[in-house]
Image: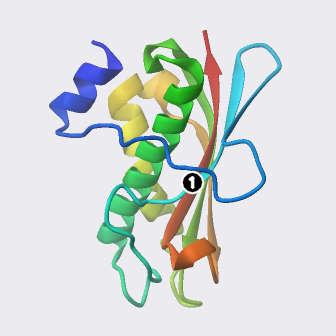
Amino acid sequence: MQVYEKLKELGLELPPAPPRGGLYASCKAFGNGLYYVSGCGPVTGVPVEGCLGREFTVEQGQVYARDCMLNVLAVLQAEIGDLNRVKSVVKITTFVQSTDDFHDQPAVANGGTQLLKDLFGESPGLPSRSAIGVNALPGRIPVETEALFEVL
């Protein structure tokens, strides 16, 4: 099944690729078929601000991590033209703005990773991963994700 059909089955759609927030490339090709997508926040409509462990629960964070991944995929699609060209999701890093006593960053990151598994399958879709707690993110967004893809 194609990625776009799976998105539709999940009741999701890719947002427009978010604009750059500074002096950097949103997506950078390198090596043989590798693409690095710069960090994307969860904004797919209404801006969201806050901190996990204070304003937001793990479950809300998972939705934000999923929305970050939708933005990452939108950036990748803008660069390569067709997400069905993705051979493997190599690595993601999810940054979670969280209180000092919040330790569920990996559970939050699962929201984005689950989407990748659902769209690309377990073997190509499950990346290596880091989930990192931070005290601040740009615009007070609660979650940001960056990713590395191998593309045919």
Q: Quadrant of residue 139?
A: bottom right
x and y percent of residue 14 in the render?
A: 35, 37
What is the x, y in percent for residue 21?
Answer: 64, 59
- For mark 1, give the secondary structure: strand
Q: Can you tell which quarter of the image residue 48 is in?
A: bottom left
Q: Amino acid at mark 1?
A: Thr
Residue 111: percent from left, percent from top:
38, 53
Q: Furthest-right residue in view?
A: 31
Identify which residue is drawn at 19% across, 36% down: 10
Number of residues whose C-alpha sits closer than 10 Å to that of mark 1, classed few (under 14), some (14–19) or many (20 or more) = many
Apparent side of residue 30 relative to residue 116 in the rendered image (left or right):
right
Residue 50 is at least partly visible in this image: yes
Q: Quadrant of residue 76?
A: top right
**Residue in the image at 50% along x and 73% along y:** 141
| Towards the viewer: 103 or 7 | 7
User: Left of 8 or right of it: where is 90?
Assistant: right
Position of 1 with respect to 69 (left or right) is left
Name the image quarter holding the C terminus.
Answer: top right
Quadrant (top left/top right/bottom left/bottom right) for the N terminus: top left
Whether 116 is drawn above or below 64: the answer is above
Q: Which residue is mark 1?
A: 145
Tell me if residue 121 can be seen.
no
